[in-house]
Image (tube, helix red, strand yellow):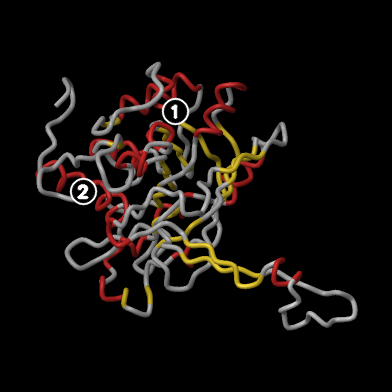
Amino acid sequence: MPFGHPEITFDLFHQLYKSCSNWGRWGETDERGTLNHITPDVIRNAATLVRTGKAISLQLPLDGNGPQTGAFGRVNPVHQMAATGTDHLARTQTYSNDPLGWGFADDSLFLFLQGGTQWDALGHIFRDGVMYNGFSAGEVTSTGAKKGDVENFPTVVSRGILLDIPKVKGRTHLEPGEAIYPEDLDEACEKHGVQVQRGDVVLIRTGDMQARKNLPAWGGYSAGDAPGLSLTCATWLHEREVAAIATDTWGAEVRPNELPETFQPLHLIMLVSMGLLVGEIWQLDDLAADCAEDGTYEFLFVGPPLRIPGAVGSPLNPQVIK
């Protein structure tokens, strides 16, 4: 454990899980969690950050070249053509004899909702049989989620900030297993000239995607060791009333996980206790380059999920507008 950081223990986990809880904060029926921090005033203020008219996508392409390797049954998207221009040229389509020469193309996409650039819904993670705000895990069945699904946040618009951790450290990327601590987030805020405000969407870049996306099988990016947030960042996120976070890693938190024999303990605090919206597998490299060029690390962020009734996650094409 690096000097000055508390020892990561089960007692610390239990303490953080309790102190960061938002259960009941917005009522016993609440399913929006920290998105309640995004008020109309927050959105109006975020809109004033649009000055140059630049728009930057943060989405990783949905194709067979993504990071999924079969872990947890997840595979990369499968894109299939149901009708093509070659069908049209071969005159094999239903309307091939149309007197106006009409033809068409059509296609389909099979994908895991958590397989690429995505949001985790609050019904995605459980602890001891419950999800955020005490709803039973039994509310998520083979027909979908009756509680905690993505339809509870049909739009996500707020101020966004980028914290480019490797840039602050003078490096290209963080190494697998390297934890990000609250003081790293504070240093990035200082170096980038931003202060976290209530309702912010905080984008945290590690450089992990850039370092591995061109390696065979993405160099173990999916489900493997990775840089990411330490458990000790929970209080930092809670006290600043952050609405959402997203990272360029597979699982947001540092892996190997800091508590032996546990899996993704910070997720239990962020999603189940805090009700925090969490995004993963975001392509932040283009944004990082633009922010480094113009020195502006705050912007209008627009990132609604797809409206998929009963879904516990959703792909999206998040947009930064500067």
Residue at 46 percent of width and 49 percent of height = 65
182 versus 31 height, above or below: above
270 versus 83 height, above or below: above
Cα–Cα span, label 1 and label 2: 24 Å
Q: Is residue 96 left or right of residue 290?
A: right
Residue 31 in the image, given as x and y percentages of width and height: 40, 64
**Considering the image in quadrants, where does the N terminus appear?**
top left
Residue at 25 percent of width and 62 percent of height = 126
Q: Residues within 10 Å of mark 2 (few under 14, many from 20)?
A: some
Say which residue label 1 marks. Answer: 164
Mark 1 or 2, nearer chain start: 1
Residue at 39 percent of width and 24 percent of height = 166
Mark 1 element type: strand
Q: Which amino acid, mark 2?
A: Pro
Q: Is residue 291 left or right of residue 50?
A: left
**Considering the image in quadrants, where does the C terminus appear?**
top right
Which residue is the extreme one toward the top?
170
Which residue is the extreme one toward the front?
90
Residue at 86 percent of width and 74 percent of height = 101
Q: Which amino acid, mark 1?
A: Asp
| Pick the front one: 275 or 61 | 61
Among the 4 quarters of the image, the one containing residue 260: top left
Residue 277 in the image, given as x and y percentages of width and height: 41, 52
Say which residue label 2 marks. Answer: 265
Q: Are marks 1 and 2 in contact (CB under 8 Å)?
A: no
Among the 4 quarters of the image, the one containing residue 49: top right
Mark 2 element type: helix
